[in-house]
Image (cartoon, rainbow, N blue to C red):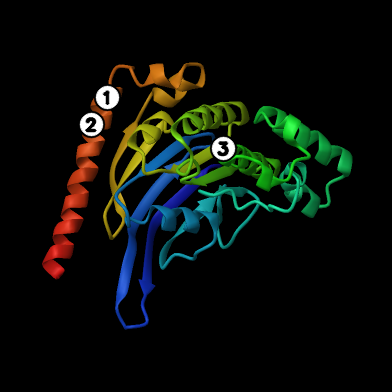
Amino acid sequence: MTGLAIDKLSMRFDLPNGTHVQALQDVTLNLKEGELMSVLGPSGCGKTTLLNIVAGFLAPTEGEVRMNGHVVTGPDAERGMVFQKGALFEWMSVRHNVDFGPRMKGMAKTERDRITDHLLETVGLQDFKDKAVYELSGGMQQRVALARCLANDPDVILMDEPLGALDALTREKMQGLVLKLWKETGKTVILITHSVEEALLLGERLVVMAPRPGRIHREYTLPFADIGVNADLREVKKSDGFSETRDEILSMIWEMEEEIMGRTENAA
């Protein structure tokens, strides 16, 4: 079976003082090959924990993740990760960052160069391939991180707040690039974000998670990502239903945040 299956996933962290934190509870999601899903929720609802389990960085307390029919037991090149900050090798050139994975696999240089040049052209960094990473702006570094992820040809791309540290204009440009890469590569993408607008623009499926223990609160199927592939994202925000859905989700998350604050005050 192709695709990604998240089956009855729970995660509990035991603390040194004998207490525990239930980060996730009975999360079930199924993604078809090529789907683009954004995940929203209040702080502490387990979004990043969920992504780390799918990546294979954490083992769940209960449940399992299956990728193309096999159980995920650790990191693998079939699942690529793009972090909030690029986690790049700053002392290396842009080219050597992008071709790092293929080099580690022992791929021939001619093939590595072909893949690297194509990806750098795709993300608009061909003229910067010999620059050191530390010479680039934040937006450029995130483009390098995307290209490096794609160089390993993963089936699934996991993105943890990849655009959160960028200024508004750069973030908008990068949102367009994410949509372009998703459509051109046909990769399955899971994107974690705190921005409701970004989740609407970059999710043909949007999942809202409830506060701890993290669980699926509501799902949406949306048209805006498909529209945005060939349209100005500012115009997409004017599409029918965009503002209404944004306001509905904002109210939903605001109510969750107030509930969390109420729990904290009562506990105090």
Amino acid, disc 1: Ser
Q: In this view, does 65 lie to the left or right of 15?
A: right
Front residue of this view, candidates 59 and 232 = 232
Q: Would you say residue 203 is visible in this rendering?
A: yes
Circle on res. 243 = 1
**C-alpha span from label 3 to label 2:** 28 Å
Percent x, y of residue 100: 75, 50
Bin the neighbour count of mark 2 within 10 Å (Cα to Cα): few under 14, some 14-19, many 20 and up.
Answer: some
Q: Quadrant of the N terminus?
A: top right
Query: Tag 2's secondary structure?
Result: helix
* Image marks 2 and 1: residues in contact by CB distance under 8 Å: yes
Residue beneath label 3, please?
Answer: 139
Query: Which of marks 1 and 3 precedes in the sequence?
Result: 3
Q: Which residue shows up at 28% across the image and 21% down it?
A: 241
Query: Which of marks 2 and 3 precedes in the sequence?
Result: 3
Residue beneath label 2, please?
Answer: 247
Bin the neighbour count of mark 1 within 10 Å (Cα to Cα): few under 14, some 14-19, many 20 and up.
Answer: some
Q: Is residue 119 left or right of residue 41?
A: right
Depicted 9 relative to depicted 129: above or below: below
Q: Which residue shows up at 42% across the image and 33% down it?
A: 203
